[in-house]
Image (spheres, helix red, strand yellow):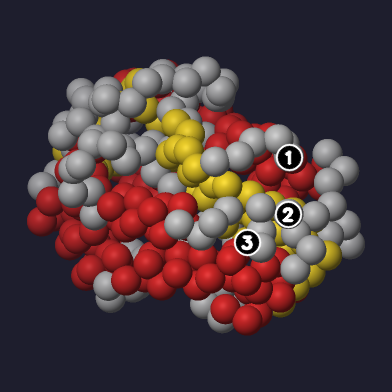
Amino acid sequence: MILVTTPTGNTGSVIVQQLVERGQQVRIFVRDPEKIPADILEKVEVATGSLLNESEFTEALQGCETLYFCVPQSNTQEDVNAYYENFANVASNAIKNADTRRVVYLSSGGKESNLQAGLITALHKGEDIISQSGASVRALRCPVFYESILYQISSLKKMGMFFLPIDGNYKMPQVAIKDIAAKAVELLIDKTWAGVEGYEIQGPEDISYNDIAVQLSELTGRPIRFQQVSNEDYIKTLLGQHHTSEAFAISLTEMLTAIGNGLYDAEPRTDDTTTTIKEWMIENVVDKIK
């Protein structure tokens, strides 16, 4: 039996779908089962509760050899480091209580860089905590998701522009969520691995935001431009348009600064992902901004 946390989240929902399609025994741990599609709900076991409740988490893990653990996404936390550490500590205790054998944890790239990277540093702290749980662990160390572009659909559609506090010419790894999910599913099904390791998932190529703008222009037939903005202006946008907490806005900006300073540069490229940014944009972006 495999327990999947955050089954309504970006990665968790795709992982559940892929596991079900492959005929695996799956239990989901969720607050509100009504948020799960009916066709999925009828094919999985359901444990209800909170990821911050150790006894509920432990109960959900009973009888499960393997766990997919992802800290729930939030942009309103007042202390980003404490947010991730709290979830990781509860998960680590539940893993110990239930004697879970293997854990696949969604972390982030740049673990060995030693750069202070805001949100990513918090993810790495969570990885350290989970790695001390006594279970075998595979930490999926991922770069920026292609899906981050979706937060700028409005400006892309209205202005033909998107904005980030990063050099538009800087090439960096990016990856599709479905490719991360595919690797997670492979590890969740495999019962032979042991030990604690990080696993780099980098996407098929390094790409810049100016490259993405050029490809979007070609795909949509309209001019698309990327514009680098200051950290201060980006934080103002997060606070005013996306209604994030100040702590999250600062942490996300620190993350992007670290990426632009080479956070992912020292990590070897892997060959596990196949979805190109062009393929992903055709499927997920083009029709939304034409």
Residue closer to the observer: 130 or 18:
130
Q: Which mark is residue 191?
A: 1
Q: Quadrant of residue 6?
A: bottom right
Contact? badges 3 and 2 (CB < 8 Å): no
Q: Earlier in the sequence, mark 1 or mark 2?
A: 2
Q: Position of residue 220 (x, y in %)?
A: 46, 26
Local SS, label 1:
loop
Classify 10 Å Cα crowding around label 3: few (below 14), some (14-19), many (20 and above): many
Contact? badges 1 and 2 (CB < 8 Å): yes
Contact? badges 1 and 3 (CB < 8 Å): no
Whole-angstrom CA distance, mark 1 to mark 2, is: 9 Å
Local SS, label 2:
loop
Residue type, numbered disc 3: Thr
Q: Quadrant of residue 77?
A: bottom left
Local SS, label 3:
strand
Query: On the image, numbered disc 2 is attached to which residue?
Result: 65
Q: Is residue 32 left or right of residue 245?
A: right
Q: Position of residue 116 (x, y in %)?
A: 18, 49
272 is higher (above) or lower (below) than 283 = above
Q: Position of residue 188 (x, y in %)?
A: 69, 43
Q: Is residue 25 left or right of residue 243?
A: right
Identify the residue at horizontal 37%, vertical 21% (top origin): 268
Q: Is residue 276 left or right of residue 47?
A: left
Residue closer to the observer: 225 or 177:
177
Residue closer to the observer: 78 or 104:
104
Residue type, numbered disc 2: Glu
Identify the residue at horizontal 65%, vertical 79% (top origin): 56
Whole-angstrom CA distance, mark 3 to mark 2, is: 14 Å
Query: On the image, numbered disc 3 is attached to which residue?
Result: 5
